[in-house]
Amino acid sequence: MMFDGQSFSVRFVWQIEVRMHTAVISAQAGIRTFQFL
């Protein structure tokens, strides 16, 4: 039970980090596109 809770929280944090990383990449791409235009 405790291990399942740890695994769930780790997966949850990992999902948040991946989403933040994707948001940063898309924001940088948007800034580059804006500067290119």
Image (cartoon, helix red, strand yellow):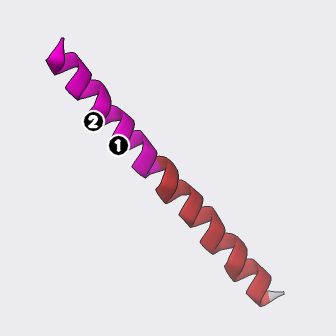
The label number, if any, that marks residue 15 in the structure image:
none
Under mark 1, the amino acid is Val
Under mark 2, the amino acid is Gln
The residue tagged with tag 2: helix, strand or loop?
Answer: helix
Q: Is residue 20 above or below residue 5?
A: above
The residue at which mark 2 appears reads as 28
Give the residue displayed 61% in from the left and 73% down from the top.
10
The residue at which mark 1 appears reads as 24
Q: Is residue 6 left or right of residue 17?
A: right
Residue 29, percent across and down? 30, 31
Q: Is residue 2 above or below residue 29?
A: below
Q: CA distance from mark 2 to mark 1?
A: 6 Å
Farthest residue in the front direction? 36
The local crowd at label 2, few if under 14, some if 14 to 19, many if 20 or more residues have their Cα within 10 Å, is few
Farthest residue in the bottom direction? 2
Residue 14, percent across and down? 55, 64
Q: Which residues are magenta?
A: 20-37
The residue tagged with tag 1: helix, strand or loop?
Answer: helix
Where does the N terminus fall, quadrant-wise? bottom right
Give the residue displayed 68% in from the left and 81% down from the top.
6
Confirm or deny contact between disc 2 and disc 1 (CB under 8 A).
yes
Frontmost residue, 14 versus 29: 29
Frontmost residue, 3 versus 27: 27
Q: Is residue 37 left or right of residue 28?
A: left
Farthest residue in the right direction? 1
Frontmost residue, 9 versus 32: 32
Toward which corner of the image does residue 9 lie, by quadrant? bottom right
Q: Is residue 30 above or below residue 8?
A: above
Q: Is residue 14 magenta?
A: no
Give the residue displayed 30% in from the left and 26% down from the top.
30
Q: Is residue 21 above or below residue 32?
A: below
